[in-house]
Image (cartoon, grey):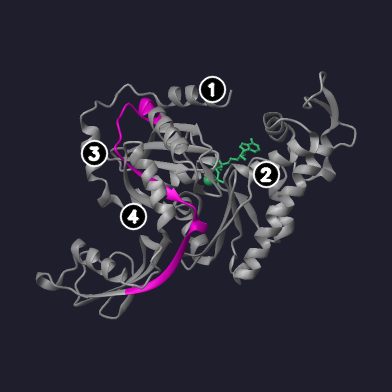
Amino acid sequence: MNEIITGIDIGTSKICTIISQMNKNGEVEIRGVGVSPCSGLRKGVVVDIDETVKSIKNSVNQAEHMANVEVKKVFINIAGGHASFVKNKGIIAVTGENKEITKHDIERVIEAAKVIAIPADKEIIDVIPIQYIIDGYDEIRDPIGMIGIRLEVDANIVISSTTSVENLTRCIRKANLEVGGIIVSPLAESEVLLSKDEKELGVCILDVGAGTTDISVFKEGTIVYSKLLPVGGDHITNDIAVGLKVSLTEAERLKRQYGFAMSDMVDEDEEININVIGSQSPVKVKVKEICEIIEARIHEIIMLTNKNLIESGLKSSISTGVVLTGGGLSQIKGSIELSKKILNLPVRIGSPDYIGVSLPTYSVAVGIIKYVERHKRDMLNSVVLETKNRQINSQFNLFEKVKEFFSDFFQ
Ligand SMILES: Nc1ncnc2c1ncn2[C@@H]1O[C@H](COP(=O)(O)OP(=O)(O)OP(=O)(O)O)[C@@H](O)[C@H]1O
Ligand SMILES: [Mg+2]
């Protein structure tokens, strides 16, 4: 069955919708992408519902138009730092004939694992099974079809603030969509950025976005830590605007065009013309000066990351290093080298390996799709019905549409 999965990354700078469909080999194919700027969030939290709803509608419309489908149910993200993780155990007696474990038993044991005391202002948004245990035999990943009397699950229960979750769901509903599920950003990203070995041995996903930096650590196959810092790539732009007295648009251009995180390596004499606020004619500025501003802020973000990793007691667990993603730092030359120097760990850039959405800024949206495909397939049925009425264009040419999209968005 050609299931459709729609993932929406609700970010501080943009809302990104990706519509995917399973091909006949059961692989995920990207069919539509929509990106709409958004200023309705601060520090990863919705502060302006109307603005967020407008951007959601806009980005979903773009993606629907490109994919030639209509979506109703969507899966969204919540920042890792806005979630907490509690380990719990669920235990049930297998009731079916022949004591064969069924999908229904899995649902029951997961429900049993959800029985924990949580504060009144928090709610459970996801349950991640770590291992199943059948009659004392542990480390079982998929117990369906196995025989047993007593089924246990060790699970990571994902908890988040009810207010954050309600505001996000309200935005989706006001955009006439249905929330299929809320996925914690680093869990989504881990599906497309990390290998099984990295997750097992210890790794950190560092997602530096526009307004936030989400630090998450994975170990022994599961997430063990997540922290949100209220700083990101837009702070670099802001520093340039203030430091050089230019508009935010001009600052963003300078960052993207000349940004380099190792200012020592920049030629002392290289000068460019910039448009200073209030000045009639362009003003000359040293590229090195721009890079010094950029380096100072990147230095601060990475130093804060290092401090949090040390304080969490997990720095020594990150044996396979740091995967840098999100748009805030990953595209500035030299940031990998600077991060390696400060963190004293291996650092690499993580981006999704899919044509048309292979930038680090798409990690969350693509990750949501992979996460749902791997762990939440049972929640997709109604999506197929929603999209059945619309004919999917068999002449759909992804390359052409992706090309069109990028020339519109990045002109
Ligand atoms: N080529 C580039 N060079 C430098 N910075 C870039 C480049 N492209 C994008 N950025 C920066 O990346 C940031 C946006 O990244 P991203 O899309 O990951 O953020 P977001 O998901 O909207 O925000 P958040 O995750 O904080 O909620 C912006 O600060 C933008 O200036
Ligand atoms: Mg983001």
Q: Is residue 87 left or right of residue 342?
A: left
Q: What distance separates the C-alpha of mark 4 from that of mark 3? A: 17 Å
For the point 78% across and 33% down, which residue is it? 245
| Amino acid type at image mark 4 | His
Residue located beneath label 1 in the image: 407
Tell me which numbered mark, 1 or 4, is placed earlier along the sequence: 4
Residue located beneath label 2 in the image: 235
Tell me which numbered mark, 3 or 2, is placed earlier along the sequence: 2
* Residue 375 tag number: 4
For the point 49% across and 53% down, which residue is it? 79
Residue 80 painted magenta? yes
Q: What distance separates the C-alpha of mark 3 from that of mark 2? A: 41 Å
Residue interval drawn in magenta: 63-89
Q: What distance separates the C-alpha of mark 2 from that of mark 4? A: 35 Å
Which percent across, then down, holds residue 136?
29, 81
Q: What distance separates the C-alpha of mark 1 from that of mark 2? A: 26 Å
Question: Element type at marker 2?
Answer: helix
62 or 120: nearer the eye?
120
- CB-based contact (under 8 Å), mark 1 and mark 4: no
| Amino acid type at image mark 3 | Val
- Which quadrant of the figure contains the N terminus? top left
Which percent across, then down, holds residue 364?
48, 46
Residue located beneath label 3 in the image: 384
Tell me which numbered mark, 2 or 4, is placed earlier along the sequence: 2
Q: What distance separates the C-alpha of mark 1 from that of mark 4? A: 34 Å
Residue 358 visible in rendering: no
Question: Element type at marker 3?
Answer: helix
Badge 1 local density, few (<14 within 10 Å), some, or many (20+)? few
